[in-house]
Image: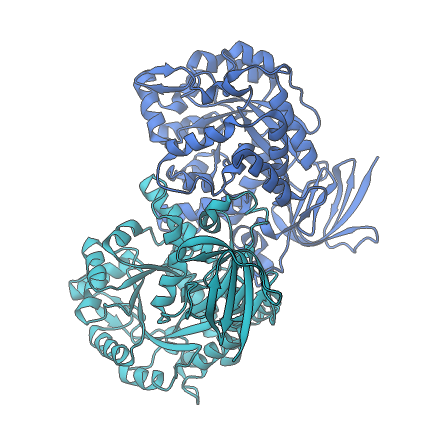
Chain colours: A cyan, B blue
């Protein structure tokens, strides 16, 4: 039995900011959380505002390599995708592991303690099968272990190359790495991955462009039998809606509903161009929506009415997606800023709700119900935000949640504890030189 | 004669990224700039990408105290303004100096070497006259000197409390501090401020809400006689347009044009709700527009078509305005992100254009034509952006301008040189503990 003691200047407990908080951790879980406590001689002092671990509900780790490199010339989501495919095509399992490890380490340093990796780089270039069928997925899992965070590997079903003129296209050369050929082969491969105390295996339907309804239905059955999370890219682009309507006479959400995909385990990623009926279907089924606002801005996707979703009862979670930025405070802030511009009013989402999207709700959407709040019995994830940087100096002691969402950034995270293990201190990952590993691996991938 | 030597890994010269750049500074100006040069034994090594100094073209320094403190509950621009007035009401000259000094020091640490302070806190609470009429303006100038940046004090003419139901309102109690009573009294007071090598005095018309056309005209004449910059808040809110139309049957831009305000010295701040004719008037007159996207998002102002402005020939400059964020890279990034969401296409403004908004164009809009580019004879302002943070690691050596706008932030600024003086090194202001001064002064203002 391992035990640890922490003492926080301020901490977020039951949605309230409390001070002088003594925390005891036993076997990676909170054993006691005591506000207004004297400090403990052996306690690690967490200097600032301590919040639950953050959950990054939608990640494509390898896209970290594209940061700022896709910012030349003009174009669209679709021209951006061509650049992304070129990077994906060059990855082998060893480089994928190192790039994902560095990217996940950047995440941990920013306060992320669980990542949902939407993983579709299954096979070799041109679709060649590796001798070990899950060698790429195993690389992602190992990367998470080494970086020190928890992972839900959302293994992606990807069968078709698109949906155009009312028919499914064959996979393009670049897409052949993503495809298992059939949902049975996919299920067989994914079935060999195992969940454990730090790994969950979940399922993902890439999108209505890449998976036909029959295959969707089988994927849904598999996920349901496994009790696994089920994520899907949904209505990120208007073109996707149009193609789906043309062939199925339904919206993507309605199509997913028709195959039984919606439910408490389902997460609609983006959901940018959904309509009121779609939101109703998501709400009735207790599905969640994952917004990725910094990526959606970068790709010019558009802005959804997130207030309408919340009012309908749809939980919102957050993802850094393409990793143009890795900063969940920035994502939470961006959700609110985009709504202010859309509605021309302030305070659309309260700060506490925005932070909950990044913590409790996010973990739940990845299948971790025992992470995301400071409660006895929950897994001991802690993230400390410094209150003495040039960004956070001067915030109100009575408004630390507002300060965290509206003034702080990932760079203000000083300490990160995952399952009671102290992974980040003084703003630095304790075991990984993050910037150096990013620089080396990205250069290997992109500049060779 | 003072001289200094710098050596940059990479620098932006004539819009191009060059490497191994030796720079000699004599009497605060660039004496030589030599790419592909050997390093000099006495040279200060600037490790990263060195760009010109940034210009913050629109600042209300005291509003730094509101960061994250106005983020409770819901509301509008107008409810936010009530909170802002409450803070303004409590400032005295001594606290104003200390708060502005800390805020300006945060700016310098973020790479800003010139600030345009849109200054309207002229008088005592309730409008009581200070014995020294410019004691508040002098405080701002002194704050800039102490923080180490150059300033254009845009002294604001503020005569009326608003424009409602077709008439000008008297100043409210909170607004009485801002008002000189008449344009003549304003001109007499402002005439006592003097420009020097580090200070420019400019004029500002607060808005069409606060200044009637006759007074505007006299202000324009004064600015023209002095060769001073002339700034005005323009069409930030739809309500302002509506009120202006109701009384003057013109848009704010057309009204300003009718009194002769437009021209190369004029900057329309925000210009969020201008129409095509307004943009035509701004373009024909060689006026500039100052966008403040992080503040405009925070206040839910709306998004203007900045591409249309650039295509018409209107220079765009940037300001951090309310200082919800102080990060001109973030402002430049936000201009592009907002356009992508508006147009659903990428690459609306090239990265080089976005950086020019924050540098060359910004300085020009504040009356400093000899700052903002790395050229022999220009004032020696240098800002070095580190390329080895978790944010910037992995960017392309051939894409450093894109990296600066799309991956870096204020926190990546390692060195800042103003007029040849090294004010910031290793990311820290050399003379001021910025966070501590912010914390102390803001607490004095807001928590007492």
Q: Is residue A55 above or below residue B362?
A: below
> Is residue B428 positioned above or below B280 on the image?
below
Q: Quadrant of the C terminus of chain B?
A: top right
What residue lies at 60% left-to-right and 26% top-to-bottom? B153
x, y (%) of residue B125?
52, 20
**Residue B378, percent from left and from top:** 70, 36
Residue farthest toward the left in the current orientation of the protein: A249
Give the quadrant of residue A206: bottom left
The residue lying at 34 percent from left, 78 percent from top is: A179
Residue A86 sits in quarter: bottom left
In this view, the residue in front, B422 or B32, is B422
Residue A273 occupies quadrant: bottom left
Q: Residue at x 44, y 23 (%)?
A: B207
> Do we see residue A73 in this rendering?
no
Residue B386 versus residue B69: which sits nearer the camera?
B69
Residue at x-position 46% and y-position 32%: B84
Q: Is residue B210 visible?
A: yes
């Amino acid at each position: 039995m391992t035990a640890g003691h922490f003492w926080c200047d301020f901490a977020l407990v039951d949605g309230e900011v409390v001070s002088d908080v003594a925390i005891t951790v036993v076997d990676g879980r909170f054993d006691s959380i005591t506000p207004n406590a004297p400090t403990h001689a052996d306690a690690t002092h967490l200097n600032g505002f301590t919040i639950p671990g953050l959950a990054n509900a939608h990640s494509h780790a390898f896209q970290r390599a594209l940061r700022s490199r896709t910012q030349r010339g003009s174009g669209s989501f679709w021209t951006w995708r061509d650049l992304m495919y070129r990077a994906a095509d060059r990855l082998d399992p060893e480089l994928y592991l190192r790039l994902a490890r560095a990217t996940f380490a950047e995440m941990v340093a920013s306060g992320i303690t669980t990542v949902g990796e939407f993983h579709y780089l299954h096979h070799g270039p041109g679709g060649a099968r590796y001798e070990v069928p899950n060698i790429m997925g195993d690389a992602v899992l190992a990367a998470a272990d080494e970086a020190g965070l928890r992972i839900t590997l959302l293994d992606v079903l990807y069968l078709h190359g698109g949906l155009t003129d009312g028919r499914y296209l064959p996979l393009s050369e670049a897409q052949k790495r993503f495809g298992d050929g059939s949902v049975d082969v996919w299920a067989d491969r994914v079935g060999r991955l195992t969940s454990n105390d730090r790994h969950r295996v979940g399922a993902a339907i890439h999108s209505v462009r890449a998976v036909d309804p029959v295959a969707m239905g089988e994927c849904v059955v598999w996920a349901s039998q496994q009790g696994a999370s089920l994520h899907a890219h949904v209505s990120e682009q208007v073109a996707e809606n149009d193609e789906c309507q043309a062939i199925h006479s339904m919206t993507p959400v309605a199509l997913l509903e028709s195959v039984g995909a919606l439910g408490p385990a389902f997460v609609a990623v983006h959901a940018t161009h959904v309509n009121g009926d779609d939101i109703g279907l998501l709400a009735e089924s207790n599905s969640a929506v994952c917004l990725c606002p910094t990526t959606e801005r970068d790709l010019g996707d558009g802005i959804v009415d997130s207030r309408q979703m919340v009012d309908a009862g749809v939980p919102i979670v957050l993802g850094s997606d393409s990793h143009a930025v890795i900063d969940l405070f920035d994502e939470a802030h961006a959700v609110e800023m985009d709504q202010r511009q859309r509605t021309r009013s302030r305070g659309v989402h309260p700060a506490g709700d925005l932070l909950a999207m990044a913590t409790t709700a996010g973990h739940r959407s990845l299948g971790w119900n025992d992470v995301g709040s400071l409660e006895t019995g929950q897994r001991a994830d802690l993230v400390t935000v410094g209150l003495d940087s040039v960004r956070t100096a001067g915030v109100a002691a009575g408004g630390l949640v507002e300060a965290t969402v509206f003034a702080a950034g990932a760079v203000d995270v000083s300490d990160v504890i995952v399952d009671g293990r102290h992974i980040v201190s003084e703003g630095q990952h304790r075991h990984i030189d993050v910037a150096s590993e990013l620089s080396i691996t990205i250069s290997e991938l992109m500049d060779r």
